[in-house]
């Protein structure tokens, strides 16, 4: 008998973490950081299992909501392998070291604030340190797509391209039980079809159990071919108004997609020469890593790569790594495109660019991805007239635009198509990684349309498989 415990990503969009127990072996699928305000305290709570008892971790991709508690897991006793796609190994180093740096900076800032306020408290400890992130990274082991691998005695995994970001994967776990093979598939984050750079998601055709994301289970994205059209419209409108185009973008995935589209628009003379800044050291390094993994590209991107085209660069792009270069952007007169992290505007240099542009009616803030509850990005999308930034209230006078076709997640039809690849219904399907009401509605939709037994588990739920 196998057992599945939902230790994160259940009733929330972040914090993905699932414990699969097969006989006496314990496998963790993802170990992400909670990034939504109602769940942030869970990052500091004890894990609902003993980290020292975990045999291995399977990592679907590098985003922090799937990887961000790995250093904490090691800090609290885990000493096994972290198994993932080889591109995710490279990107996770970038993401986890950056996350650890943020944890250390936040701890230092809180300690200084307490001292200013005259509170006699011990120095704030970071969730984990850079040294602890480095220790976690030493346990990473790379696999490739479409290879069946024995990870533990009698337990096998197969990884397929999820098309979400570079190196993202769906993972199928198989084991023997009562003389037959049993299986469970974890979707990770399902990508959109027909996106630039990446291949389409590659579904499995058989599974006894399914754990599937539901981020956009309640909506339909704009067609992907609308992305360059909408991007061109937003750019030209911002030029006419004389402001800057500020783009909060995830360092891994969204920044590279934006650069690809901007290069195409410039190459076809659909937009004029325009200063473009990628102002995020992490995004710059992620772009370099993406350039080193053409094996993950789709056919079109691979053809451009083989012709020697830099798919992430063009004459107008400047990669600003230092703080001095970043500050200099705000002294430039005229319209510029500023792409910076973080994608939900919760940290990083993007906050400084928003501070400079939010109150300017001639500027545009372009939202290009999902914005979790409680984030600054979510407030802007929902039409907030005022927001707090660096402990000051700022009036929102800039134009807020959103491009829905850039999402790295499949929409409702895309997820239904991905699920529909199964040749026969699973015994049960569980829907996670979505707002609680969205996950529940999507589970109901799948049950109604496909006749499956479905549910949307809550944090801590334990299921016998």
Image (cartoon, rainbow, N blue to C red):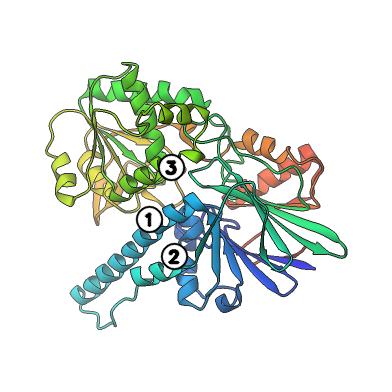
- Is 267 placed left or right of 120 in the picture? right
**Spatial CA span between label 1 and label 3:** 13 Å
Residue beneath disc 1:
94
Q: Residue at x 75, y 56 (%)?
A: 183
**Residue 105, numbered label:** none
Looking at the figure, which quarter contains the C terminus?
A: bottom right
Tell me if residue 310 comes above or below residue 240 in the rendering.
Answer: below
Q: Residue at x 75, y 72 (%)?
A: 23
For the image, the number of numbered tags is 3
Q: Of 247 and 256, which appears nearest the observer?
A: 256
**Spatial CA span between label 2 and label 3:** 21 Å
Residue beneath disc 3:
253
Q: Earlier in the sequence, mark 1 or mark 3?
A: 1
**Residue 90, horizontal then vertical, whole percent:** 43, 54
Residue beneath disc 2:
137
Asked whether residue 382 is in view, the answer is: no
- Is 235 placed left or right of 133 in the picture? left
Helix, strand or loop for disc 2: helix
């Amino acid at each position: 008998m196998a057992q599945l415990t939902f230790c994160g990503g259940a009733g929330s969009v972040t914090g993905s973490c699932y414990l699969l127990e097969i006989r006496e072996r314990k496998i963790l699928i993802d170990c992400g950081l909670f990034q939504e305000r109602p769940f942030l305290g869970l990052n500091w709570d004890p894990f609902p299992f003993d980290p020292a008892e975990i045999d291995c971790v399977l990592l679907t991709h590098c985003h922090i909501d799937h990887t961000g508690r790995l250093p904490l897991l090691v800090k609290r006793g885990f000493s096994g392998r972290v198994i993932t796609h080889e591109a995710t190994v490279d990107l996770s180093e970038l993401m986890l070291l950056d996350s650890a740096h943020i944890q250390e900076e936040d701890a230092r800032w809180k300690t200084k604030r307490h001292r200013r306020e005259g509170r006699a408290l011990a120095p704030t400890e970071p969730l984990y340190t850079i040294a602890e992130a480095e220790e976690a990274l030493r346990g990473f082991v790379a696999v490739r797509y479409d290879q069946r691998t024995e990870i533990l005695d009698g337990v096998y995994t197969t990884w397929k391209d999820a098309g979400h970001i570079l190196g993202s994967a769906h993972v199928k776990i198989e084991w023997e039980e009562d003389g037959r093979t049993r299986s469970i598939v974890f979707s990770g984050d399902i990508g959109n079809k027909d996106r630039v750079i990446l291949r389409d998601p590659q579904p499995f055709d058989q599974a006894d159990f399914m754990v599937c994301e539901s981020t956009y289970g309640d909506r339909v994205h704009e067609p992907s071919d609308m992305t360059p059209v909408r991007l061109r419209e937003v750019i030209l409108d911002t030029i006419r108004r004389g402001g800057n185009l500020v783009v909060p973008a995830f360092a891994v995935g969204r920044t590279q997609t934006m650069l690809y589209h901007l290069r195409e628009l410039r190459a076809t003379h659909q937009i004029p020469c325009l200063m473009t800044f990628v102002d995020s050291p992490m995004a710059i390094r992620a772009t370099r890593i993406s350039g080193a993994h053409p094996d993950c590209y789709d056919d079109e991107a691979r053809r451009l790569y083989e012709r020697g085209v830099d798919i992430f660069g063009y004459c107008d792009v400047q990669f600003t790594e230092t703080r001095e270069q970043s500050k200099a952007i705000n002294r430039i007169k005229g319209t510029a495109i500023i792409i910076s992290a973080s994608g939900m505007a919760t940290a990083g240099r993007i906050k400084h660019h928003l501070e400079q542009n939010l109150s300017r009616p001639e500027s545009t803030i372009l939202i290009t991805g999902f914005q979790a509850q409680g984030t600054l990005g979510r407030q802007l999308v929902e039409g907030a007239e005022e927001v707090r930034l660096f402990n000051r209230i700022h009036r929102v006078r800039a134009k807020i635009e959103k491009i829905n076709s850039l999402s790295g997640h499949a929409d409702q039809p895309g997820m239904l198509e991905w699920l529909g690849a199964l040749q026969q219904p699973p015994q049960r399907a569980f829907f996670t990684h979505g707002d609680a009401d969205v996950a529940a509605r999507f589970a109901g939709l799948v049950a109604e349309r496909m006749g499956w037994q479905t549910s949307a588990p809550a944090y801590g739920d334990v299921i016998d498989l």
